[in-house]
Image: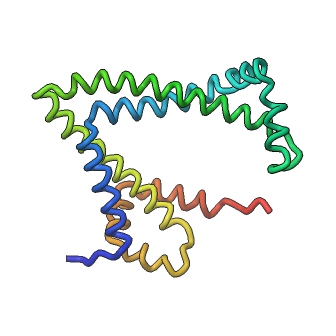
Amino acid sequence: MPTLNGLDYVLLFVVAFFTLSGLSRGLVRQIVDLVAWVGSIYLAFSFGDQLAAELNRLFNLDVHLSQALGPLWGDFEIGAMAVNILGFVVVVCVTRMAAELLANALDMVAKLPVISSFNRLGGAALGFGKGVVIVFLVASVARAMPAGAFSAHIESSQVVNAVLRISPRFYEQLRDFILRVRPLV
């Protein structure tokens, strides 16, 4: 049996953490959370600037924030940027709060005796899948980037080698992208 190195244990811990978290939270909660995050980010990109403009119209925030943040950040449009960020964050937070109310209502149904077991097992399966995807992305980036002395750990990692066999084509595309990037300076 091949031996595991420290990186393997860290990556296996990530998968175990997401699996146990999924078991604890359940499939319904995880699906609602995933849809809520995607939806809140979409809505924030779609309506955050409109909310920022309305907040700025009502409270003249860009002037106040420029005066408050200008000395710290320099003499550029920090107030306008801060108002845009605020609009984005407010839309994300409001959407997440609404999704949380929906998730709580659905959790009550998901805790019924027969449904509860399937909900927890489905949550563990989805959590396992999320953990594997995260480990796959980390392994792909770690293997694709020059890592110096740490590259020996990456090359000898049983987990990295196993997850990269899931999609060698994606790894190759990511490696080509990373190697193609040039510094901006």
Tell me: 71 left or right of 138.
right
Q: Residue furthest right?
A: 75
In the image shown, does 35 or 161 lie closer to the viewer?
35
The image quadrant of residue 137 is: bottom left
Q: Indicate the position of residue 19 as horizontal and vertical percent values.
A: 27, 49
Query: Which quadrant holds the N terminus?
Result: bottom left
The residue depicted at 38 percent of the width and 61 percent of the height is 164
From the viewer's perspective, is 123 left or right of 178?
left
The structure residue drawn at horizontal position 84% and vertical position 31%, both measured from the top left corner, is 63
Measured from the top left, where is residue 69 in percent x and y? 79, 43
Q: How many marks?
A: 0
| Residue 52, quarter of the rendered image | top right
**Colouring style:** rainbow
Outermost residue, left direction? 114
Quadrant, the C terminus: bottom right
Front residue of this view, candidates 182 and 32 = 32
In the image, residue 21 sits, relative to residue 110, either above or below, namely below
Q: In front here: 39 or 103?
A: 103
Residue 59 position within the rendered picture, expressed as x and y whole percent measured from the top left: 76, 22
Q: Is residue 122 left or right of residue 148?
A: left
**Residue 145 position within the rendered picture, expressed as x and y whole percent measured from the top left:** 55, 67
- Height in image: 46 above or below 174? above
Picture quadrant where residue 81 is located = top right
